Image (tube, rainbow, N blue to C red):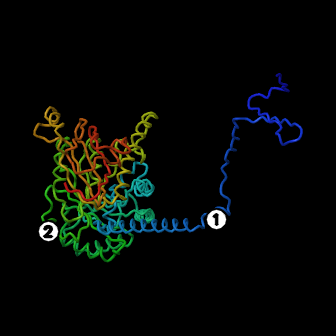
Amino acid sequence: MPSNVDGDLGYGSVAASQGPGLAGSLVVSETVPLLIPESEPEPRKWAPLTKEQLEREAGGPRWRKIRSRLVLFFWICWLSMLGASIAIIVQSPRPVAPTLLWWQKALFYRLQPALFMDAETQGAGVIAVSEHLPYLQSLGVGALVLEGLFSNAVSPPDLSLVDPSVGTTPQIQHLLMESHKAGLKVVLDWCDLDLPAPEALVNNSNVQKAIRYWLDQGVAGFGICDTDTAYSQKTLVELRVLLEEFSTQDDERIVMVTQKGDVPNTSSSSLNTSMVELVTRSLLPQAHHLLSTQEVAIAVETLLDTPMGDAWPSWTLGEELAWRLQRVLMVLMMTLPGSPVVKYGEEINPTQNVSLGLVQGQHADVQMDEGKRRRSEVSLFTSLSHYRGREEALLFGSLSFLSFNSTSLSSSSSNSSSFPSSFSPPILAFLRSWGCVHVLVVVNLGSETHALDPAWAPSLPSAGVFMTSTGMNRLGAISLDALKLGPQEGIVIKLFQTGSYSP
């Protein structure tokens, strides 16, 4: 029987016929998909909490409890660290810095006003010194020792009159006033003057009047040599009485004694140190010839290995040296305990002293080269004086002489023709220690480059920072294991170490 199909119902079509209980006929066609695809969810957009939502969340009991615990934990940790720091500071030993007087901190500069004069400037030496006070101040000089102010033409000399060939009394007064403004002390030197015997000097009213006059003008003290006729216990006692009359707590007047004899004066060994502030000793022994490198090394090593004693020391080079050796010994003198006394021209090569106008008629290129070298030399002197003035370890730190022990130098020293096989390598070193800060000074007096053996001082830190060197060509951090010293070079290194060093 044929069927009438109105259309293709297709897949999923359902035909419904009239049931027996319905009137008429009704054909319903419905298409139902068997797989219904889900609708894609909308992408979630991040939105920050509003102010109201943030306040509502932060004000909840859970966050309030967390915040209070965090704040409590922070304060507990902070107080614990503070207490531990205080305990460490209290329990750790701290050195007490002694109070140093001006003559213990000052760098003394010894000069003769006559060196600034020539035939056209007769009598203007003192004026030239006054004009160069800013230069001397820039070097870090703290006190001037003026030599040759008094004439020996009359015996005994009149200590109240200045030698007319050098200057006049008003010029000296002006120099004293300008020095005071620049913060420089002035000491008058009487060394090598034909002073009367001690009894005559003490009882001489003219001498006492002259001393009072200069002290009233602001002179900081007087210098005398241990070889002078007037040098005695009586002279120093009388000087001490007059100096104490003009001394104050902030402006103490001093007596300087320069040791010029090979053997100190018999009376000097028994002098009470309270009567003499400075006893200037030479780093090198007196000699009638130019000292060799070997003689310099032996003399300095002997000096460093000799106890300093209780008296405040004062140092000078004392002997003419080759210029490179003089630079190395300048490093030693400026870093040893005590007050260095530098002679005029030792901060720069005296034969090339262009800074004070003593070189005339040079060609422009020569002047340029020498001017460059002079600036390097002055930079070394200035860095040494300034470091000494502000570094506590160099002012009042302890001294430890370090015996250099390097196997690498054994063969080189024995094969070198400059030094006999029995002579130790020309490497000298010492340590200035104050608390946990150490200043290491190492000098090579030889003519060869040497590397340091780490075994020479195993207790020291392995690294440090350069403070200065004779070549002015070393900067920044340095490892002691890799340290090499050039010929006739001196270096100063700052080290940091917890605790004290015991060689």
Secondary structure beneath disc 2?
loop
Front label number (1 vs 2) = 1
How many residues crowd mark 2 within 10 Å: few (<14), some (14–19), many (20+)? few
- Farthest residue, direction left: 422
Q: Is residue 342 left or right of residue 372?
A: left
Which mark is on residue 55?
1
Q: Amino acid at mark 1?
A: Glu
Q: CA distance from mark 1 to mark 2?
A: 88 Å
Name the foreground residue: 210 vs 338. Answer: 338
Could you tell me residue 151's position as x and y percent? 30, 60
Looking at marks 1 and 2 on the same chain, the residue that comes earlier in the sequence is marked by 1
The quarter of the image holding the N terminus is: top right
Residue under the point 21% across and 46% down:
428
Q: Is residue 465 above or below residue 308?
A: above
Secondary structure beneath disc 1?
helix
Residue under the point 67% across and 47% down:
44
Q: Is residue 118 above or below residue 24?
A: below
Residue under the point 17% across and 34% down:
412
Name the foreground residue: 421 vs 206. Answer: 421
Could you tell me residue 145's position as x and y percent? 33, 60
